[in-house]
Amino acid sequence: MRSKDRIAYFYDGDVGNVYFGPNHPMKLHRLCMTHHLVLSYDLHKKMEIYRPHKAYPTELAQFHSTEYVEFLHRITPNTQHLFANEMARYNLGEDCPVFDNLFEFCQIYAGGTIDAARRLNNQLCDIAINWAGGLHHAKKCEASGFCYINDLVLGILELLKYHARVLYIDIDVHHGDGVEEAFYFTDRVMTVSFHKYGNKFFPGTGDVKEIGEREGKYYAINVPLKDGIDDASFTRLFKTIIAKVVETYSPGAIVLQCGADSLAGDRLGCFNLSIDGHAECVRFVKKFNLPLLVTGGGGYTKENVARCWTVETGVLLDTELPNEIPDNEYIKYFAPDHSLKIPGGNLENLNSKSYLNAIKVQVMESLRSIQISPSVQMQEVPPDFYIPDFDEDEQNPDGRMDQHTLDKQIQRDDEYYEGDNDNDNDYMNTD
């Protein structure tokens, strides 16, 4: 056992100002609510808090196509009507709208996950948290399911520079299709997704029979669930499968996507999980004592998302939180009882014991088919950054620093950064 985990937590208050649109279920305000709840419980005093760097287009293009990244960079709400063909090609529109500061939003949440992976790689922390990340549906050349840039894939690619094998675990109510697709043909990443699967439920993939192909055969694991699964069924299945996966695969690092739309009462979800049940999965994964990158994901009942990710921050810090929410800027959202935990739901559980057992048997069969911890030829570690050089003499001296860079040097009133973060300089201030 490690004596005490060192935890890095990434947050940029600017993400909370991003607005998908009036009728869109994605409310990024939930990230500000989470952060203020974390502060109100004094959890920031037990972690290193960082503002992530904004990921460069060249970093985003380590997975995404250059043309797609450039289009996201260029498009604005005022010009989108001029690009009907590109909008269709890149799947931008109703689910994935174009809004103000879209590209900066992508840079911030992706930058947080990339920075988290780098700190883990450089052994500067044991656990890294980026609740703004976890946008698992984005594809190489298109947006999907409210996701534009797949920060998880970028974080995993970063971890693969130092680790032969990376395990990806996803407990969002939706299938982690973008991450699975990115690594479907390789044994260097095992993806394990627990999700609702059924007629017309987005994204429509994630059958237990989808197991990977070529070198990746048996390295994609899907646990398709039906409506109403409860804490006892979910955590039992989760622990059985994940314990066997870790034993068989021997990952060097784990990425855990904690989408909170699998909680009871979510606007888009259909499970019965309580916050305790959801958090039990995080507690279980933490016990493996492997480098751990934790992200957010879905979650559309925003006060419950904030509750959940705050409790899970506490779990990662081995800190039990009082159920009475302390006063904070968003306290009115937690009325009338101001309690931290939410109970499970009362939807009918359509997952029979025989159904769950059949899924478990199929997953175990897949795991038996792979060689124990596959051997990987390690490559030379590529550099962390591919940053273009700027000739300072050619730049207007007054315009050299963009507003975001200047902002980074100012402590905002609504954020809290503990200490000087003297590790930052060599890896964050790269502008």
Image: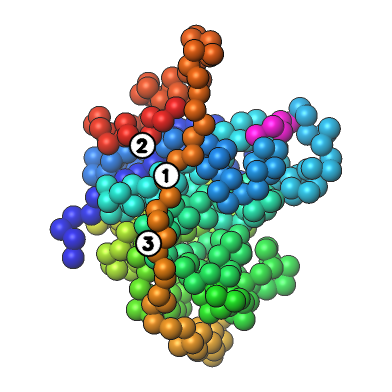
Choose between 348 and 6: the one closer to the eye.
6
- Residue 74 in the magenta stretch? The answer is yes
Left or right: 159, with 197 as reference point: left
Reading the image, the residue beneath label 2 is 427
The residue positioned 33% from the left and 52% from the top of the image is 120
Cα distance in 3D space between marks 3 and 2: 20 Å
User: Which quadrant does the N terminus fall into?
Assistant: bottom left
Q: Which of marks 1 and 3 is nearer the N terminus?
A: 3
Q: Can residue 315 be seen in this view?
A: yes
Reading the image, the residue beneath label 1 is 384
Which quarter of the figure has residue 80?
A: top right
Cα distance in 3D space between marks 1 and 3: 14 Å
Magenta range is 73-77
Task: Examine the rendered structure and indicate whether residue 183 appears above or below residue 146.
Answer: below
Left or right: 359, with 421 as reference point: right
Q: Do the residues labelled 1 and 2 touch (CB within 8 Å)?
A: yes
Q: Are marks 1 and 3 in contact (CB under 8 Å)?
A: no
Left or right: 5, with 268 as reference point: left
Element under disc 2: loop
Please state the horizontal and vertical placement of residue 172, each as a whole percent of the image.
53, 62
The residue positioned 27% from the left and 44% from the top of the image is 47
Task: Examine the rendered structure and indicate whether residue 328 appears above or below residue 344.
Answer: above
Q: Which of marks 3 and 2 is nearer the N terminus?
A: 3
At label 2, the amino acid type is: Tyr
At label 1, the amino acid type is: Asp
Q: Which of marks 1 and 2 is nearer the N terminus?
A: 1
